Image (cartoon, coloured by chain):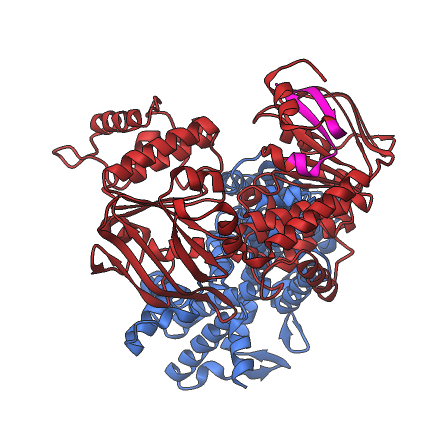
Amino acid sequence: MGKNKLLTMRGISKSFGKAVIALNDVQFDLEEGEIHALLGENGAGKSTLIKVLTGVEERDEGEIELCGRSIHPRSTNEAQQVGISTVYQEVNLCPNLTVAENIYIGRAPRTRLGGIDWNAMTRDAKELLEKFDLRLDVTQSLDNYSVAVQQMVAIARASDIKAKVLILDEPTSSLSNVEVEKLFSIMRKLRDQGMGIIFVTHFLDQVYEVTDRITVLRNGRYVGTYKTADLPRVELVSKMIGKDYAVLNQALLEGKEEKKAAKRGDVFINMKNVSHTGSISNMNLKISKGEVLGLSGLLGSGRSETARVLFGIDQVTGGELEINGEKVHLQHPLDAIRRDLAFCPENRKTEGIIADLSIRDNIALALQAKKGLFKKISKKEAQRIADEYIEKLEIKTPSADQLIKNLSGGNQQKVILARWLATDPKLLMLDEPTRGIDIGTKAEIQKIVIDLASQGMAVLFISSELDEELRCCKRIVVLKDMERAGEVEGDEISEGAVMQIMAGGEEQ
Amino acid sequence: MKNRLSKLSGNQAFWPVIIFLTIILFNTILTGGEFLSISIVDGHFYGRIIDIFRNGGKLMILAAGMTMVLATGGTDISVGSVMAISGAIACSIINGNLFPQLGGSVAMAIILAVCAGIVCGLWNGFLVSQIKIQPIVATMILLVAGRGIAQLITSGKIITINSDAYYFINGGYILGLPFPLYIVLFLVGLLLLFVHRTAFGLFLESIGCNQLASKFAGIKVNRFLLAIYTISGAFASVAGLIESAGIKGADCNNAGLNIELDAILAVAIGGTNLMGGRFSILSSVIGALIVQSITTTVLALGVPAAYIRVLKALLIIVICLSQSGKFKQYAAKLVSGKKHVRKEAVAL
């Protein structure tokens, strides 16, 4: 392993306003030729530290040295010029430009006349991507490709810029296992060439698979830096979330008991041969009050699509939908909300949060829509509701006035959850509620789900993480190719059983 | 005290008010106090300040409607043409060319003109919300076609009318103050009441920030867009009435010409984000006063007409710079020479 210090950060502090201290005297160092995991719960300060390093945010205090020289990047562009390049969690490329343009934007090869040398650009882009085993038509616009491919393109772009430091901020959350493997092999290759890689992730398996060292942050403070090989998992987890882990786990175990004890109530949702052209076909699904029903299946199998139809986003084109014994035709989410349905969508950023509004407004929104335009929720009432859920769901924020975009992902998710709980729903649909969220908050959300069901709420739980579904759900319906493929219940539930149905084994 | 001041300066309307007062002060000094003087003739107030409020009436109304359109992330560039249509309809009815059976009723003229504005707004809203045409293109259709429609109504002629009742809309006085001011107070007041007493304001901000998430939260986004463009059209027709009452006739070619740009400028000066989201109707109305006072200033200083536009542009640059957070930071840096003045910047 390289011994030369590549990057050192000392005494970094950053606060937003007076109330939010994002970083407090944090340090970090990176050696040449290492993959260094930056870990911590949501709100621990990982993202802020990355932003400070890449010039997105200006630090209040502290020193950053790159190769022994003090640097002070004021924009991502400046950071790139000194050799720090970044791939963010959400792909930050231009979807309407071509793949090649995206890779070379801002640094396109020039012809002698000073124009852009399109041929060279296309050729170079192709070559670069081939190194990543990606064979794309680089003259196609980027949005023709899946998010996973876009992410790989972003990584290719970042690694091609003559970077000394490559930052990967949650790059794997939208990738499949095969793609993750590919990414890791590229990361190792880059490391062996002497690049220093900072890897931010929530997946502990991946940390142990690919990283050399680990730095842990908690609540904006530096906890410590460890050799990955020397740090047992349990210890890592306890460092990340403090001592509460045992307690949390206990709570979850108790929840599990409750889950077993809870009995199913009346059928609330009854889908009879429901189809929506192009997304689901002949779906039969019953959801009862007081149960957590898992919806499992591969990407594109119709999981989210089922929820969209139930919520009136996509209209039923065939079959019948009954809610609480009544046949319905949902035209708009509001129709579903008025029938006491609630839906936390998968894409928190584009479909969930209203970024520029306060937590209070974000929480009040759905309830207000349910009540209608003219029955305004007073500011006082909205404040009371917000405070109630900030406390109940332990949303970490100085006040309900805070804009939701300033919260970490996990806390944003809790706010969206609060928005729906405030409408007092009878069916709560959660689509990937814990994606991109740290294990501490994850466990909390799972616990909340089980609690809600035990109080009589029906919950539709969609997750691509099987063990999460195993933990929360009493019944799991497995989808395949837009259709229902099978169902497992009670003691039959196991990873193997679900996977067998997913893979196309016989119905159970 | 300091706390109160900082709370005040945090209000969106704070800077527009300061700018407006500065322009007034500037004028007062340059004209040796004449600018501020208000005389009373026949129990009516006269003076430059009164002029600003009277002549700015149209713009204030347009700006109020435009604020909401811009807050959704859209735009409405057809308001000037809608003004022309509204003036043409009203004047044609009054002089009996259109619907002679109404007998030149001023009340019916006004009602039908406003109805025409509503129809125009519905059309814009329909194109934007149902057909999903980009707002600037959708409203461009009426921008171009609107004057043609107005000319069809007036048979291509400039109409002059003779009706004291109609003149009153622009030239009338109540309790010494010009009538357009009351129209502004009524419409803006109504709108503010609607925005603040219902959930309209919350929904509007939400739609402006994120249409998809708003829909998922149960807001009927399309219906809202339709309503908002309709209000903008209705307001434009009222502005058209004031304008045509002012020139005592209908001039389809020049009524409300380029005024959509002034209206958008007024909203921008008011600090509403043109990309949608947070908005303040009151700030936009003050923004409209600023735009109007610039025109009045230029006239008051006796600047040759050829320079008016250039001067206006310069003033706009100064105002926009003073509104820019980045520029303020930069200026503060220059003044104080310190490195980290950024602390209170809008990083949040």
Q: Is residue A199 above or below residue B274?
A: above
Q: Is residue B48 above or below residue A119?
A: below
Residue closest to the eye, A40 or B252: A40
Q: Is residue B146 above or below residue B337?
A: above
Instruction: State the residue lying farthest toward the top.
Output: A506
Look at the image and say whether residue A479 sits in the magenta stretch. yes
Instruction: State the residue lying farthest toward the left.
Output: A112
Residue drawn 38% across and 38% down? A210
Taking the image as shown, residue B115 lies to the left or right of residue A240, namely right
Residue closest to the eye, A297 or A134: A297
Quadrant including the C terminus of chain A = top right
Where's residue A355, x and y in %? 55, 52
Residue closest to the eye, B275 or B138: B275
What is the span of residues highlighted in magenta in the rendered image? A469-491
Quadrant including the N terminus of chain A = top left
- Using the rendered view, name the quadrant where residue A274 is placed: top right
Look at the image and say whether residue B275 sits in the magenta stretch. no
In the rendered image of the structure, the colour used to display chain B is blue
Where's residue B50, x and y in %? 55, 75
Residue closest to the eye, A3 or A148: A3
Would residue B114 be seen by someone viewing this image from the given angle? no
In the rendered image of the structure, the colour used to display chain A is red
Where's residue A277, x and y in %? 65, 20
Where's residue A354, x and y in %? 58, 50
Would residue A329 be seen by someone viewing this image from the given angle? yes
Residue drawn 65% across and 59% down? A360
Give the total number of marks visible in the rendering. Answer: 0
